[in-house]
Amino acid sequence: MTQPRATVYEVMSAAIARELCDSELWFLGMSTGPQTILMLTRLPIVAMSLAQHMHAPNSWMLVAGWVMNPDTSKVPTRMESEFGTALGEWPAEAFNNSLSMSYIAGRHEIDVGFGSAAQVDKYGNCNTVAIGDYHKPRVRLVGPINQPGHFSLFGREIIIMPHEKRNFVDRVDFVSGAGFLEGPGCREKLGLRGGGPFMILTDKAVFRFDEQSKLATLESVHPGVSIEDVIANTGYTHDYVPSTVRETLLPTQEELRLIREVIDPLATMLPR
């Protein structure tokens, strides 16, 4: 039988899952808008569950700050609010007091968080507040929500967003999530104990941050995507394309089986 072709969202889910380790605590907040819910809520949930099935059985998935290790095969069809009734009816191992979330984060117990933005710059700074001048913005966005905490307190942050040139800028108009700010040493000067951004994952490619310069660097392009396509949709002006760029690994047969038969059997989470 021919192996079914993996969708870009399955490729992305597998890429995230491989970055997650056993005995970690992963945090995911809620999002709004169909595309953002898919990219920043449903896709990471599939990825976290995949990691738990594959190599991280002792890890914890914390959704919206209070739903612990939910059953992804029974995900609510609507996830409209962090405090909505749908989440409370989601079968899970435990339900936490959402007010304790700030204490867990403050003690630096969250290993991985997931975030997105309207803009991300070459140092991984994120903007969810305003496009243009803050006092007279062209667009007023949703606001920082919990992004400052994500980027300053969590062990590492995975940024997930659609790959459009307007999203990838040399310098964000407003810093709501502190990446590496203006370069090496800046996080340390501000006393930010969390590791900051770790990876940018889009529907076209994967970026990492160079250990020395802290600049975003293209690591891989997804199957069927060219480097030229990535360049055409990226607004960075530094040399972010190394001499060798690999293709993002496809999900293995076992990873794809788990996604389609165990984690998301009804394709509620990821379209296919």
Image: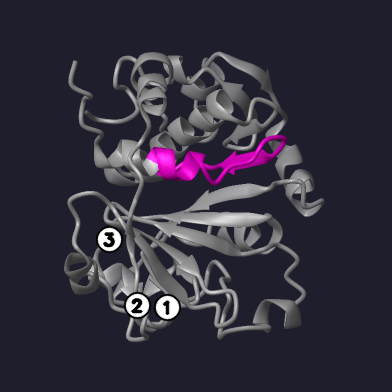
Residue nearest the viewer, comparing 160 with 126: 160
Of mark 3 and mark 1, the one earlier in the sequence is: 3
Residue 18 coordinates in the image, percent (x, y): 51, 42
Please name the residue shown 61% across and 64% down the image. 196
The front one of 254 and 122 is 254
Quadrant in the picture for the N terminus: top left
| Disc number placed over residue 172 in the picture, else none | 1
Residue 79 lies, in percent from the top left, at 42, 30
| Residue topped by disc 2 | 169
Q: Are marks 3 and 1 in contact (CB under 8 Å)?
A: no
* Cα distance between the residues tagged 3 and 1: 16 Å
Front disc: 1 or 2: 2
Task: Judge whether residue 116 is colored magenta.
Answer: no
Badge 3 amino acid:
His
In this rendering, does residue 32 appear at all?
A: no
Q: Is the Cβ of the residue at disc 1 closer than 8 Å to that at disc 2? A: yes
Q: Residue at x 18, y 21 (%)?
A: 2
Question: Magenta span covers which residues?
Answer: 13-31
> Mark 3 and mark 2 in contact (Cβ < 8 Å)?
no
Amino acid type indicated by mark 1: Val
Q: Amino acid at mark 2?
A: Val
> Does label 2 or label 3 sit earlier along the sequence?
3
Residue 142 vs 91, above or below: the answer is below
The quadrant of the picture occupied by the C terminus is top left
Above or below — where is 24 with respect to 136?
above
Q: Which residue is mark 3?
A: 163
| Left or right of residue 130, residue 203 in this image | left
Image coordinates for residue 35, horizontal then vertical, percent: 28, 44
18 within the magenta span: yes
The crowd level at tag 3 (other Cα within 10 Å; few <14, some 14-19, many 20+) is: some
**Could you say whether the residue bearing mark 2 is in a helix, strand or loop?**
strand
Horizontal and vertical percent position of residue 17: 50, 39
